[in-house]
Amino acid sequence: MDRSGDRKYFTIIPNYIVNHSTVYEQAIYLYMKRVAGEEGTCWMSAMEIALRLGCSRNTVAKYQKKLVEREWIEVIGKRATGETNQQTIEYRIIDLWSLNIRHYEDKSKRSNIERLSQSLQPVNESVHLVNEKHSTIVHKEEPIKKNNKEEITISMSLKEFVEWCSKSKHRHIQIIGNWADTIELNLETKGQWEAFIKRNVRTAKDLEPFDDEKIVQGFRKIQKAVKEGWLKKYTLETLFKFIV
């Protein structure tokens, strides 16, 4: 029996998944959940999923690993597939409905990401990381005050930053979060993430008109250039240039 709670001809997913995941995590989770069917497992290869979703095999493998780490899916073994009996990893979709219900029933409790977002202070021309009730703000340069030092050094992991960005109503913030996740940027404090947004906000806004598929294609071109050896370093601005 499918542990995910699917029904025939349609797939139900918890809102928690939609609101706490990146674009790639959503796409891969949803596709694997649909494929799982009544038995609740998926052993489709990463390459085949990649072909269906229009992304690279490495991207699928990377985000499947993240979904396992987040305990949204689990590895239960390997299964022989195809005429050659190629071994592929078999995953089970984990039941997240209890997590979903607990999260949304307790409205009085604010998530860790929202608390982190509220306490962030603007640094120079950086962007406020605030909750969904506020808009993104860019302001003129201001000196860093001594009493802001503690706020700036509060820890914030890549995972927390990406989750916050994915909840933003602004596409350019979502793009910055996806970019940080794609290049696996290793920053550790709110101040560092503010500076990262400041450096990339203009280019991210330039990328807003392009759909996700176009952005993925641009990153593939970057990967190819790196593999060929003529591109050593790249930024979000590099991605924009490869697209246009």
Image (cartoon, rainbow, N blue to C red):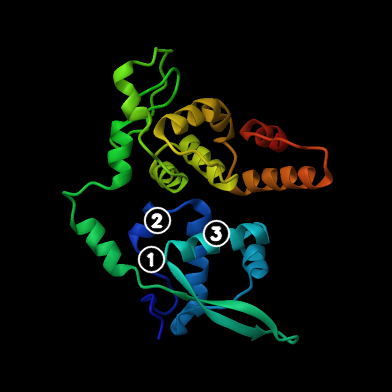
Query: In the shown orientation, is residue 229 left or right of residue 176?
Result: right
Q: Are marks 2 and 1 in contact (CB under 8 Å)?
A: yes
In the rendered structure, which disc, 2 or 1, sits on the residue that comes first in sequence? 1
Q: CA distance from mark 3 to mark 1?
A: 18 Å
Q: Is residue 143 above or below residue 82?
A: above
Could you tell me residue 73's position as x and y percent?
46, 70
State which quarter of the image contains the N terminus.
Answer: bottom left
The residue lying toward the viewer, choosing from 25 and 147, is 147
Q: Residue at x 33, y 36 (%)?
A: 117
Q: Amino acid at mark 2?
A: Val
Q: Is residue 110 above or below residue 170?
A: below
Q: Which residue is mark 2?
A: 18
Q: Is residue 180 above or below residue 241?
A: below
In the rendered structure, which disc, 3 or 2, sits on the residue that comes first in sequence? 2
Q: Which residue is mark 1?
A: 13
Q: CA distance from mark 2 to mark 1?
A: 8 Å
In the rendered structure, which disc, 3 or 1, sits on the residue that comes first in sequence? 1
Q: Which residue is mark 3?
A: 63
